[in-house]
Image: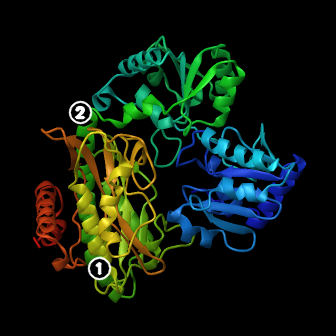
Amino acid sequence: MPDTLSGPTIGARIADLRAEMAASSLDAFILPRFDAHQGEYVSPHDERLAYITGFSGSAGMAIVTAETVAVFVDGRYSVQVENECSGSLFSHHHLFDQPPEVWLNAVVQNGWKVGFDPMHLPPGWFDRFATACIETGATMTALEHNPVDAIWQFQPSAPLGEVSVFPLQLAGRSCADKSADLATYLAAQDAELLVDTQPDNISWLLNVRGNDVAFNPMPQSFLIADRSGGITWFVDPRKVSEEVCDHLPSTVAQRPISEFLADLRNLCKAGQRVLFDPDFSPVAVRQTIAAAGSTPVSVASIVTRAKSVKNSVELSGLHDCHVHDGVAWVEFSAWLDATVPTRAAAGDPVTEREAEAKILACRQARPGFLSESFQTISAAGGNAAMCHYAAINGHNAPILPQRTYLLDSGGQYETGTTDATRSFAFDQRPDGYDQAYTAVFKAFHSLATLRFPRGTQGHHIDAICRRPLWDLGLDYDHGTGHGIGHRLSVHEHPQRIGKPYNPVDLLPGMVVSIEPGYYEAERFGIRIENIFEIIEGIDGFLGFHNMTWAPIQTDMMILDKLSNTERAWLNSYHQHVFQKLSPLVGDEARKWLSAAVVPI
């Protein structure tokens, strides 16, 4: 997260932005958190939403008018946005229950000009806002220059992380093979071009990795593929070494990233079909295709789908790095269990940031570790009720025996990406915690052991996971599972498990998380998360095969609420954890692990 709090106050920044809007005769400005790649994580250069509002979450947007700054976030950030965007300057809204286009429709007036950056707004979002404006007599106005950039003092430079080769022995398939499949697909679709602006897709296709955005080992770039097998890669040449150039097949041509839209317009011919992803492309892509006389075809990128089904080499690498990650979890958990009570008794309690640093140090001791895969969520007590809490910007609560604790953390390794969450208790627990913790485990187990037929999609099975919580009148306001990349994005599309409709079949070779939880504001938060590979049984039904190896604390479980099946699964899981990890951990951690996996 960049230092968005230095320089002018938030109020001064909003005033400066409104002055810039007035100079362009804008009555409203749409400010998403997106950069030109429409992803979850952005570089400090692109943290425009945080600069204007102070909101540091990974998903959200704002609409700025002369009267207010309306901030929209999902349920993960409802508490956080109240803390970070307080005062009369802001109004707060739920991104889905109070959609921004509905709010805009109620606010805009006839003749208003609503400005937006066409490189930072996906077509689907644009269409919803455009409809809201048409109904009220307002107009959407595409801006050549982003007004936030015009008033941002000391804006960080665009990233220049070095691009590296991702070798075939780790990728499992060559760039040439993947490109040939893409060309075949374009021919089958009677399309001349495919445009892809997702950095992880492009990195997977070209077998490269990068270092432009924290936690995301991929370069920011754009790509245009044609049906003859040619690829034009738009990337800053300062990032690309001679080794990378030699690695790429001759069918890949490099162009400066600044020439992307101009080249796209030149490549598009009248009457041709050009494919683009409506959810992960800037609307500028669709507008450019149409302006050139081609037919823009809105379809989820085939690269996204191909990347999601891991080959045997990728799966082997993911299984391998999860064992190393499990060692880090055990070493950390043993340290935490021993240190929290003794340090608290000595009047020098362990802090959230100290615990965050410790899990990082445990990973850094493992072979192949490269970096964290996201900002670790190290949350004590009521802080854990904020699903994406981070111990930054002055937050650093003590971890005390009478407080519960939640750690959500992951790593980027040479062979893959990890993500897991565990909830801890040391002594006393708040009223209701044990009941909720038990229900969260039952929810986790219900999905982890599910078998389902081909054709099943994530929203079909989400309620199966939530049932044990719903039985108690409890729920959680976030997804149940997300895809995970192969040394790429920790939140990988298109597969996911959640309440919203997601028409993507779950397929063998996909890798997903299962992570139910429960949260009570200012009291506690609970989540259990493992990563699973989707596998096919001999009867053709699909199921989940565990990848994550870390003990699940049993002290807080109400044992008579568990079925014999649930007990047997947990005991078997812990037996496998011990078998895999005990030879790899230190003596003290091995002693702790032996106690942690005692059968219930």
For the point 26% across and 45% down, the residue is: 533
Q: What residue type is labelled 2?
A: Ser
401 to the left or right of 79: left
Residue ID for mark 1: 435
Q: Is 546 or 551 nearer to us in this picture?
A: 546
> Which quadrant is the C terminus positioned in?
bottom left
Q: Who is closer to the viewer here, 75 or 42?
A: 75
Query: Could you tell me which secondary element the residue under label 2 belongs to?
Result: helix
Question: Measuring 13% from the left and 65% from the top, which residue is drawn there?
Answer: 565
Q: Can residue 164 be seen in this snapshot? A: no
Cα separation between marks 1 and 2: 40 Å
Residue that carries the numbered disc 2 in the rendered image: 312
| Left-right relation of 125 to 454 | right
Say few, some or many: other residues with alpha carbon within 10 Å of mark 1 (under 14 / 14 to 19 / 20 or more). Answer: some
Which label number is shown at residue 88?
none
In the image, what residue type sits under mark 1?
Gln
What's the coloring here? rainbow
Q: Quadrant of the N terminus?
A: bottom right
**The image quarter in which residue 274 lies:** top right
Q: Residue furthest top?
A: 228
Q: In this view, does 72 lie to the left or right of 374?
A: right
